[in-house]
Image (spheres, rainbow, N blue to C red):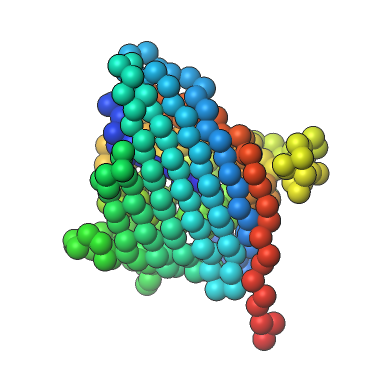
Amino acid sequence: MIRIPKPKTLLLAALANFLAWTPPLTAAPLQLASHQAVYDLKLEELSTNSGIEAVRGRIVLRLEQQCEGIIMNQRMVLEMVNIEGGAIVSDYNLSTWEDNEGNIMRFDMSNRLNGQQIDKYSGVAQRQEGTASVTFSEPAQDDMELPATVVFPAEHTRSIIEAALSGENLLSAKVFDGNGAEGLSDTLAVIGKKKTFADPSDVLEELKDRSYWPLQLSFFDLREQMNEPDYEVGMKMFENGVAMDLRLKYQEFSLNGKMSNFSFLEPEKCSSE
């Protein structure tokens, strides 16, 4: 699933547990479709006194479902122009690998502003024996304790799809997504009624007649205990984990993300033994 940098990462001025759902421990992990997608981002709305005049960007996402885990590579480039005409270009990259059981995640995140690196985090997050933590390899710092119930992005995506298939419409979860020391969020997913994608463009022909759910994801900063979300992500979520028609809502502006390129990738061949 798309993960986006938090507002602080973009240098912007600036949950209640309705449902605690976990997949059965004996269930085989749901397989996500290996695919690559490109989303063109356009400004939808600006808040009053934001100091921003224009925003545009692009997300490139590549997800590979392998035999032992999931590789996700994502790049998000945003150009923001202020009212004086000055431009800020944010170049955000996140690479992760998660095992299929959702117990281990390796991550590498970096963000550059106008070519200058301002954030870089690498490390391993893992859950074991009722505990969870993050060990950072870059920068060198103490381990970060996580809630024992934490989930990682691929498992979070699978959990949402499993909940939707079961007819649930709410899912709350604490998610660590690899965004360094600020990567832990409380999340609330609101799942709409199942629909069929019936009228795709030529770019999206491979998704024709597939089922999806309208999905609204709210992210809350655990440190601030705010009632309002830090940011929100809306999308159409397909049964295979593909997302389209993005809406990224920050406090200062919101963006629409139209899928401009999409392709399924050849799945890895796994032993039947």
Residue 83 screen position, x and y as percent:
33, 16
Q: Is residue 186 left or right of residue 135?
A: right
Residue at 35 percent of width and 66 percent of height? 124
Residue 66 screen position, x and y as percent:
58, 69
Residue at 81 percent of width and 44 percent of height? 209
Residue at 41 percent of width and 32 percent of height? 79
The quarter holding residue 268 reads bottom right
Residue at 63 percent of width and 39 percent of height? 260
Q: Is residue 95 visible?
A: yes
Query: Observer-nearest residue: 127 or 182?
Result: 182
Q: Is residue 148 visible?
A: no
Residue 112 screen position, x and y as percent:
32, 44
Residue 222 screen position, x and y as percent:
31, 43
Q: Is residue 244 left or right of residue 49?
A: right
In the rendered image, the residue lying farthest to the left is: 141
In the rendered image, the residue lying farthest to the top is: 48
